[in-house]
Image (cartoon, helix red, strand yellow):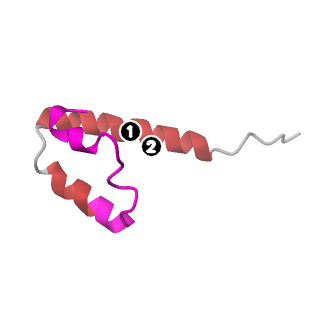
Amino acid sequence: MSKGNQAFDDENIFENMPHEQIMNTIKEGLHYLTTIDLVTLHSEISRVQIEHSHLREDPPHDTR
């Protein structure tokens, strides 16, 4: 984590937030990021999407 976020190292600030508040916080924070930050964030979002899709996949069914 970057130096500016050290206060959050020991806690999950999103844990007790409602979904809508998490989304609003993330969206508002986007305006404070650099282009490089946004590209990095996009990469992380893609990684999480792939991870989630693999977790939800059903095992292959035998179609014999």
What residue is shown with label 2? 49
Residue at left offset 22%, top offset 38%: 6
In the image, residue 50 lies at what x, y percent? 48, 38
Among the 4 quarters of the image, the one containing residue 60: top right
Report whether 39 appears left or right of 57: left
Q: Is residue 11 magenta?
A: yes
> Callout 2, which amino acid?
Gln
In the image, residue 2 lies at what x, y percent? 20, 32
Residue at left offset 84%, top offset 40%: 62
Q: Residues within 10 Å of mark 2 (few under 14, many from 20)?
A: few
Q: Are marks 1 and 2 in contact (CB under 8 Å)?
A: yes
Q: Residues within 10 Å of mark 1 (few under 14, many from 20)?
A: few
Residue 30 higher or lower than 39, as above or below:
below
Element assignment for label 1 = helix
Residue at left offset 36%, top offset 49%: 12
Q: Nearer the viewer, residue 18 or 24?
A: 18
> Callout 1, which amino acid?
Ser
Specify the quadrant that holds the C terminus: top right
Among the 4 quarters of the image, the one containing residue 22: bottom left
Among the 4 quarters of the image, the one containing residue 10: top left
Q: Nearer the viewer, residue 24 or 12?
A: 12
Label 1, label 2: how far apart the Cα atoms are? 5 Å
Residue reaching furthest right? Answer: 64
Tell me the magenta residue range.
Answer: 1-23
Report whether 23 appears left or right of 59: left
Report whether 9 appears left or right of 33: right
In the image, residue 31 lies at what x, y percent? 11, 51
The numbered disc on residue 3 is: none
Q: Is residue 18 magenta?
A: yes
What residue is shown with label 1? 46
